[in-house]
Image: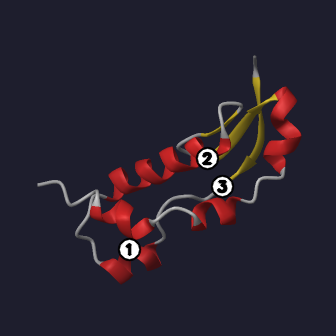
Amino acid sequence: MDQIEVGYVSYTLTAERIAQVGADFDVEGADDAILAALNDQVGPAVVVHRNGKVFADADAADRARGIDWSELLRAIDIDQVLADHPTKR
């Protein structure tokens, strides 16, 4: 089924958060883990792409537009994500 664009979510670590914890981790790996966690939470009919654009199957578009992205992001343990992605050496 074709998917349609239904929104945008800013899921990457902010510069403020990076400054708080220092740069001693793999930022790209952490962002990828956050993206994967979001996609796990929304189900197969909705997908967040690396650029933050959200796409959904046509029959899931209304549900996708109503997703509370802030709530889903709060459910992700960012400290654990950072611990799981140390700096590449």
Given contact means CB atoms under 8 Å apart, are the residues at marks 1 and 3 in contact? no
- First reached walking from the N terminus: tag 2 or tag 1: 1
- Sequence-earlier tag: 1 or 3: 3
Question: Is residue 86 shown left or right of residue 54?
Answer: left
The residue sitting at 83% across, 48% down in the picture is 65
Q: Residue at x 28, y 77 (%)?
A: 22
Which residue lies under the disc numbered 1? 18
Q: Is residue 1 above or below residue 55?
A: above
Residue 85 as seen in the image, left or right of residue 51: left
Image height of 89 relative to 4, above or below: below
CA separation, marks 2 and 1?
24 Å
Going 33% across and 78% down the picture, which residue do you hit?
21
- CA distance separating discs 1 and 3: 19 Å
Q: Residue furthest left?
A: 89
What quarter of the picture does the N terminus occupy? top right
Q: Mark 3 — residue?
A: 9
Which of the two discs, 2 and 1, sits closer to the camera?
A: 2
Q: Nearer the viewer, residue 25 or 80?
A: 80
Query: Which SS class for mark 2?
Result: helix
Q: Secondary structure at mark 1?
A: helix
Q: Residues within 10 Å of mark 2 (few under 14, many from 20)?
A: some
Q: What is the quadrant of residue 82 in the picture? A: bottom left
Kindly give the residue lying farthest to the bottom in the view shown. 20
Residue 6 coordinates in the image, percent (x, y): 79, 42
Mark 3 or 2, closer to the camera? 2
Q: Disc 2 marks which residue?
A: 41
- The residue shown at (71%, 31%) is 45
Q: Amino acid at mark 1?
A: Ile
Amino acid residing under circle 3: Val
Furthest residue to the top? 1
Residue 20 in picture, x, y percent from top left: 37, 83
